């Protein structure tokens, strides 16, 4: 069935980063689809490959599974396959066409201090900067067949040529944001990138962080598009943070954000307001029943007064 789905457009796959405590059972999760609507790839084989040593590029096959009706797959790793704390790359491949998606398993010791970063409007300068990249991503993943059937006056290549001149795929970064992330890593903190972006934009999110030199850490997008809606995103972030502390046992003790959703998610997760930093128009605001977090004017001057 894979070749038929490919006629809808290019692959829109995603593999979720996994965060576990040392010795905890590990399950890899991915979602597979094609074209601008991310049409689900169901009842198809997926093969998992893992690099079982931190920092090495030696891959082994770790198992096989079949996608469900929603294009999702889960695959449990053999106990003891990964050697202690570290970051381990994995790849979920679709043998039907050779496409796939990659993620990381982050094995952390209990008590590891964690700093959480929102992305849009926090690391980037504007909440809406994702839109340009999303439009380009959607057009690139659309089959030429759709342009022909729709009777559009331009081919796919010409649409892309015009859009690439009008839109900016690389969102602008707040000056000094990457230096703040590196500062906390030098102090022993594990960065976690927690965004309300939907899973469809997994690749462009990872590429942006890599392009701007942000230190490695779990990247978490929503599993369901509805969780990206303003009414749901705060609860989604709170659930993830609570799971990190209760299941993995890490210490989520620092947070950066820009929206009222970030403010409430961090406050309800129990992160101290003195160690929560909000940039942008909502700096200085508080979640109902909680003290206001610290406003962040700019990252450069923030480095001079950042707490230990």
Image (cartoon, helix red, strand yellow):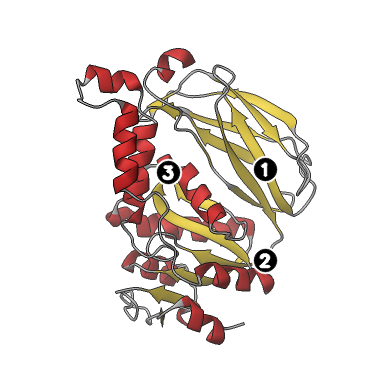
**Is 294 on the left-hand or right-hand side of 45?**
left
Which residue was labeled with disc 2?
Answer: 112
Q: Is residue 76 above or below residue 134?
A: above
- Residue 244: quadrant of the picture: bottom right
Instruction: Say few, some or many: other residues with alpha carbon within 10 Å of mark 3 (under 14 / 14 to 19 / 20 or more).
Output: some
Image spot of residue 46 (x, y percent):
59, 24
SS class of the residue under badge 3? Answer: helix
Cα distance, mark 2 to mark 1?
A: 20 Å
Image spot of residue 219 (x, y percent):
53, 52
Mark 2 vs mark 1: in front: 1
**Is 147 on the left-hand or right-hand side of 56?**
left
- Residue 292: quadrant of the picture: bottom left
Q: Please report the residue visible at 39 percent of the width from the left and 17 percent of the height from the top.
A: 7
Q: Please report the residue visible at 54 percent of the width from the left and 43 percent of the height from the top.
A: 16
Q: Quadrant of the C terminus?
A: bottom right
Image spot of residue 70 (x, y percent):
42, 28
Cα distance, mark 3 to mark 1?
A: 19 Å
Which residue was labeled with disc 3?
Answer: 201
Q: Please report the residue visible at 26 percent of the width from the left and 18 percent of the height from the top.
A: 148
Which sits earlier in the primary sequence, circle 2 or circle 3? 2
Which residue was labeled with disc 1?
Answer: 89
Mark 2 vs mark 3: in front: 3
State if disc 1 and disc 2 touch (CB < 8 Å).
no
Q: Is residue 48 above or below residue 238?
A: above
SS class of the residue under badge 1? Answer: strand
Numbered label attached to residue 269: none
């Amino acid at each position: 069935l894979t070749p038929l789905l490919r006629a809808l457009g290019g692959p829109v796959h995603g593999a979720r980063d996994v965060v576990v405590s040392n010795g905890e059972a590990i399950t890899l999760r991915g979602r597979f689809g094609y074209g601008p609507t991310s049409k689900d790839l169901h009842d198809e084989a997926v093969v998992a490959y893992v690099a079982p040593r931190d920092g090495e590029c030696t891959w082994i096959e770790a198992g096989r599974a079949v996608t469900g009706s929603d294009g999702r797959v889960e695959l449990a790793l053999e106990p003891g396959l990964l050697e202690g704390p570290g970051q381990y790359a994995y790849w979920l491949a679709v043998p039907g066409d050779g496409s796939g998606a990659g993620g990381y398993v982050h094995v952390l010791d209990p008590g590891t201090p964690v700093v959480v970063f929102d992305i849009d409007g926090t690391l980037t300068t504007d909440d809406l900067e994702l839109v340009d990249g999303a439009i380009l991503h959607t057009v690139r993943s659309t089959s030429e067949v759709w342009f022909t059937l729709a009777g559009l006056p331009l081919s796919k290549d010409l649409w892309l040529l015009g859009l690439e001149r009008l839109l900016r795929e690389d969102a602008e970064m707040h000056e000094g944001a990457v230096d703040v992330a590196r500062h906390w890593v030098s102090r022993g903190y594990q960065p976690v990138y927690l965004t309300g972006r939907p899973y469809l934009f997994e690749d462009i999110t990872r590429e942006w962080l890599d392009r701007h030199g942000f230190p490695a850490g779990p990247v978490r997008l929503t599993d369901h598009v509805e969780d990206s809606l303003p009414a749901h995103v705060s609860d989604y972030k709170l659930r993830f943070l609570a799971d990190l502390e209760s299941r993995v046992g890490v210490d989520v003790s620092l947070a950066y954000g820009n929206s009222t959703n970030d403010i409430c998610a961090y406050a309800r997760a129990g992160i101290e307001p003195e160690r929560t930093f909000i940039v942008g128009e909502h700096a200085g605001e508080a979640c109902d029943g909680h003290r206001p977090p610290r406003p962040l004017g700019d990252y450069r001057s923030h480095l001079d007064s950042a707490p230990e």
